[in-house]
Image (cartoon, rainbow, N blue to C red):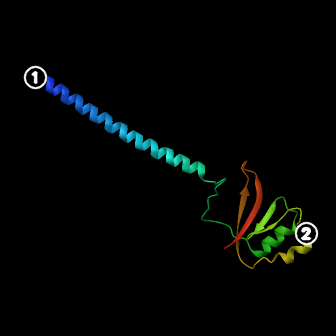
Amino acid sequence: MNHAYKMLHQAFGVFLFCVALTSIFFIYTNYLDTLQRFNQVLNDEIIYEQTIDVTETYYTKGYIIAFLLNELTYDVEIDGFVISQRDNIKDKITSYSIENKNFTKGYLYDANGTVIRIVFKSI
């Protein structure tokens, strides 16, 4: 009877040891996976991500020209062409060669979350 008790005790000890090793293995792999995802998030250079709403508003060439006729608060980018708020001269608006398309309007932010440019992209 004593031998059976000792044998069960040792078998239970070996079983607990195997469970502990398996748990350590799974915890370690989970730790490495979490660390890899964290490093990936840190390496992404996304300053600000703007979600696109299904009911997105589209802007016409006429709207953009009317927008440029007013005094600009921020720099404006139209399909990669940047118009500085200081260099916006109303007489030069026709030379900007804005295509007759619909545009989406977005904002470019700096690292502090301040708007630095209004971006119009053609669809």
Give the image location of residue 24, x and y in percent.
36, 37
Q: Secondary structure at mark 1?
A: helix
Residue drawn 81% across and 61% down? 75
Q: Is residue 45 left or right of residue 60?
A: left
Residue drawn 29% across and 35% down? 19
Q: Mark 1 belongs to which amino acid? A: His
Position above or below: 59 against 5 = below
Task: Identify residue for label 1.
Answer: 3
Classify the position of the C terminus by image quarter.
Answer: bottom right
Give the image location of residue 20, x and y in percent.
32, 33
Give the image location of residue 21, x and y in percent.
32, 36
Residue furthest to the top in view is: 2
Classify the position of the N terminus by image quarter.
Answer: top left
Residue drawn 18% across and 25% down? 9
Report crowding for label 1: few under 14, some 14 to 19, many 20 or more residues within 10 A (C-alpha). few
Task: Identify residue for label 2.
Answer: 89
Q: Is residue 96 left or right of residue 111?
A: right
Asked whether 9 or 57 is in front, the reply is 9
Separation of marks 1 and 2 at Cα, in angstroms: 99 Å
Residue furthest to the bottom in view is: 100
Tag 1 near tag 2, CB within 8 Å: no
Residue drawn 15% across and 27% down? 8
Q: Secondary structure at mark 2?
A: loop
Asked whether 112 or 54 is in front, the reply is 112
Tell me the quarter of the picture where residue 109 sits. bottom right
Asked whether 79 or 17 is in front, the reply is 17
Position above or below: 37 against 51 = above
Q: Mark 2 belongs to which amino acid? A: Ile
Q: Is residue 3 left or right of residue 27?
A: left
- Mark 1 or mark 2, which is nearer to you? 1
